[in-house]
Amino acid sequence: MALPPPDDLTSLVLRTDFSDDAAWHALRAAYDAPDGGPYGTWVSDPRYDGAGIPALLEEDGAADEEDRLTYVFLADAKALADGPERFLLAVDLYDEPGRTVRVPPAWFPDLSANLSIANLDFADFADCADATGTFRGWDG
């Protein structure tokens, strides 16, 4: 079965932790675009509860080629943890399958827009991550 397809010109944001619904809603609110634009297709499907990167790579790899994704954002346990840093985990599914980078709300629209139209590659962002593995802009 293929991963859920994102809406046109948006990125799939897949919930993989179902331990706290309030945290899920807070995370979504933190990522709402200030300009009102839809940058994410938010999927909260309990079948992905606890799904790790290997399982998602396997599921995407088993899909028909036209249904495969090149990347996905995960709302994992770390992203849903209490605190101001509710950073999504971006996962490369294509060039370097399994490579990750954390993404703060302020940078999500840029990553989503550029990746969804293939203007930039996943590595363009991941290569600029800081020591914690978080993309905080082009200057780190």
Image (cartoon, helix red, strand yellow):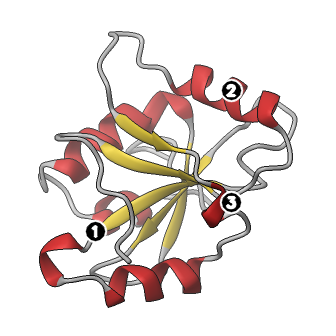
Q: Residue at x 43, y 44 (%)?
A: 139
- Which numbered circle lies on residue 69? 1
Marks 3, 2: nearer the viewer: 2
Q: Residue at x 76, y 43 (%)?
A: 80
Q: Which residue is mark 3?
A: 132
Q: Residue 117, percent across and down?
A: 12, 49
Marks 3, 1: nearer the viewer: 1
Q: Residues within 10 Å of mark 2 (few under 14, many from 20)?
A: few
Going by the image, does 73 lie left or right of 78?
left
Q: Residues within 10 Å of mark 1 (few under 14, many from 20)?
A: many
Q: Which residue is at the front of the view, 81 or 2? A: 2
Q: Residue at x 77, y 53 (%)?
A: 78
Q: Which residue is at the front of the view, 23 or 48? A: 48
Secondary structure of the residue carrying numbered label 2: helix
Secondary structure of the residue carrying numbered label 3: loop
Q: Residue furthest top?
A: 35
Kindly check if marks 3 and 2 are in contact, taking CB atoms under 8 A apart as contact. no
- Which numbered circle lies on residue 25? 2
Tell me which amino acid carries mark 2: His
Tell me which amino acid carries mark 3: Thr
